[in-house]
Amino acid sequence: MTASTLAQWMLQSNSTLILTGAGMSTESGIPDFRSRKGWWKNTDPRTVATVESLQQNYELFREFYQMRIQSLMDFEPHRGHEILANWEARGHLSLIATQNVDRFHQQAGNHAVAELHGNIVTIRCQSCGKPLPLGHFVDNAVCTYCKGKLRPNVVLFGETLPQEAWNRSLKEIQGADLVIVIGTSLEVYPVNQLPAMCKGRLVYINLDVAGNSRNFDLVIQGTAGEVLAEVDKYLQEPIVE
Ligand code: APR
């Protein structure tokens, strides 16, 4: 009944926000960070995902993000992403606030997306801040303007979140009737503070629900693709009580 309950809550909601994490993209083939096969299982994030690593160990930093960018090219959004794009088109959601840097929500057709941790497919110079083509970073080039180090526009640990994305997500979450959190361990600050700011109903869809379930009105354990498909079925033919 949980999928039909969520569908009913969505139909009753005038403003639904979706908050996603890396678990939203694992069915596309991209690892998450903290699960058994996650990126941080074999790589210490301090050595590749901090400003210090960019400044002090640039080759390792660049290699790590080149590898992630390359692997992204082999994958594409899955049905879960497509369902969320369809929900936006049908007016069932007002914003996707995402921690993901893969732009799969936009690739699947969503327009209302706030990139809370930036993205991995656009590049800038760490020194002069000027944007440069992705290919320059992939080809180990330096900044054509100042010879500075190139880096993807991801938010590294210790960096502040993009203000526009954060403010938009905060405003939407505080006004939302319904917030659906999908595929995140909620371990990373400050995004993990956002669900608590919702005054409406709060739903958690995740493979591993241990440790987080007490804060939610409804918890659905499962994969994003399967659960979203289940809910979408009920949205297509609403249950008449
Ligand atoms: N469907 C639903 N949930 C899933 C799926 C799936 N197919 N696959 C994995 N999960 C769940 C895992 O059980 C885990 O709880 O998704 C969660 C992913 O958690 P993390 O790996 O911690 O990823 P996330 O929460 O997005 O990390 C936050 O940390 O490393 C930084 O900047 C990085 O944005 C990232 C942030």
Image: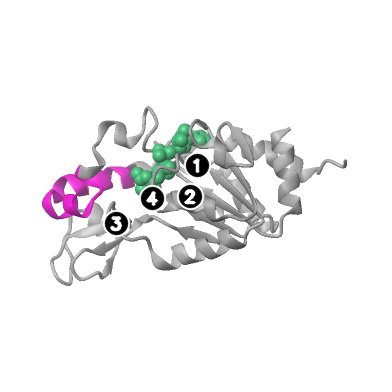
Q: Is mark 1 within 8 Å of ligand 1?
A: yes
Q: Amino acid at mark 2?
A: Phe
Amino acid type, label 1: Met
Q: Is residue 83 magenta?
A: no
Instruction: Give the image quadrant in which the ligand numbered 1 is located.
Output: top left
Whole-angstrom CA distance, mark 4 to mark 3, is 21 Å
Residue 104 is labelled as 2
Taking depth in this image into account, of 66 and 160 the one nearest to the observer is 160
Is residue 235 found left or right of 98 in the rendered image? right
**Residue 230, image x, y percentages:** 68, 36
Number of the front mark, 1 or 4 = 4
Residue beneath the point at 57% across and 51% down: 18
Give the residue at mark 3. Answer: 152
Mark 4 or 3 closer to N-term?
Answer: 3
Q: Earlier in the sequence, mark 1 or mark 4?
A: 1
Classify mark 1: helix, strand or loop. helix
Q: Quadrant of residue 187?
A: top left
Q: CA distance from mark 2 to mark 3?
A: 16 Å
Q: Residue at x 32, y 56 (%)?
A: 155
What label sits on residue 24 in the rendered view? 1
**Residue shown at 54% from the left, 65% from the top:** 171
Residues at marks 2 and 1 touching, judged by CB atoms closer than 8 Å: yes
Asked if marks 2 and 3 touch (Cβ < 8 Å), the reply is no
In x, y percent, where is residue 47?
19, 43
Mark 4, residue position: 189
